[in-house]
Amino acid sequence: MSQRTGILLVVSGPSGSGKTTLCRRLADLGEAHYSISCTTREPRPGEVDGRDYHFLTRGTFESRLAAGDFLEHAEVHGNFYGTLTSEATGPLAEGRDVVMDIDVQGAAQVRGCGDPVIQRALVDLFVMPADEEELWSRLSGRATDSEETIQLRMRNALAETEHWPEYQYRMLSSTREEDFARFQALVTAERMRASRCVSRANRP
């Protein structure tokens, strides 16, 4: 008999790729723990602390950053964003899988983490629309965005897609159901890796 160690599945992709939907759906099915990020920005209408983000004051964020509590972090438009290491290591220690949707800079920081628990658990996936036409269609789907905003998001998205070779896996997005089926297949395959199996006889 054996018990496996948990997976840390880091998912990146441009805005509109569906990466957050994939991660949230897997977590909603009870298949994984969804890693909730911290931010210093103010909550938007409808956002709930502990569900959408952990909302921290700038002082608290900086103190925890100085203490080395963050697995990855960045400053965007004057606000800090980051993932606490405990969001990953806590569930992993219990043998649970963790899903985390973060940008390419954050994913690079996770890859560079020296913690052997993180490195053993890490699997990364880049999700991208099949072509630029599909990407434009998804980005322009929000009727509230101006043409200028869509153009900016498109440029940022195309710049992000250049990073896909840095990932272990790449998925060209199709329909939501097809994407989720392939996402689940990846998780299932990673759970069967022999290197993740721990003999109960060898457990501390």
Image (cartoon, helix red, strand yellow):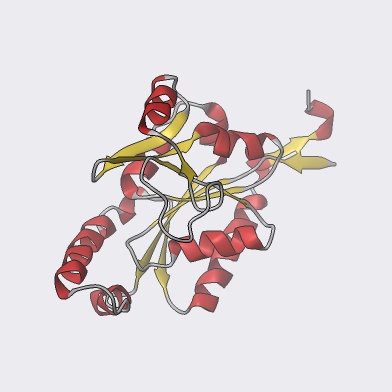
Q: Is residue 50 above or below residue 118?
A: below
Q: Compare residues 151 and 107 and report the one nearer the observer.
A: 151
Seen at 52% across and 64% down, the residue is: 22
Q: Is residue 44 above or below residue 172?
A: above
Taking the view exactly as shown, the residue that stands out farthest to the left is 148
Taking the view exactly as shown, the residue that stands out farthest to the front is 45
Q: Compare residues 72 and 196 and report the one nearer the observer.
A: 72
The answer to which image quadrant residue 70 occupies is top left
Quarter of the picture holding the N terminus: top right
Q: Compare residues 92 and 203 and report the one nearer the observer.
A: 92
Q: Position of residue 176 (x, y in %)?
A: 50, 76
Q: Position of residue 16 (x, y in %)?
A: 36, 68
Q: Is residue 46 above or below residue 59?
A: below
Quarter of the picture holding the C terminus: top right
Q: Position of residue 140 (x, y in %)?
A: 27, 77
Q: Position of residue 71 (x, y in %)?
A: 45, 33
Seen at 14% across and 70% down, the residue is: 148
Seen at 25% across and 73% down, the residue is: 145
Q: How many marks?
A: 0
From the viewer's perspective, tell me whether residue 2 is left or right of residue 197: right
From the viewer's perspective, tell me whether residue 72 is left or right of residue 89: left
Taking the view exactly as shown, the residue that stands out farthest to the top is 67
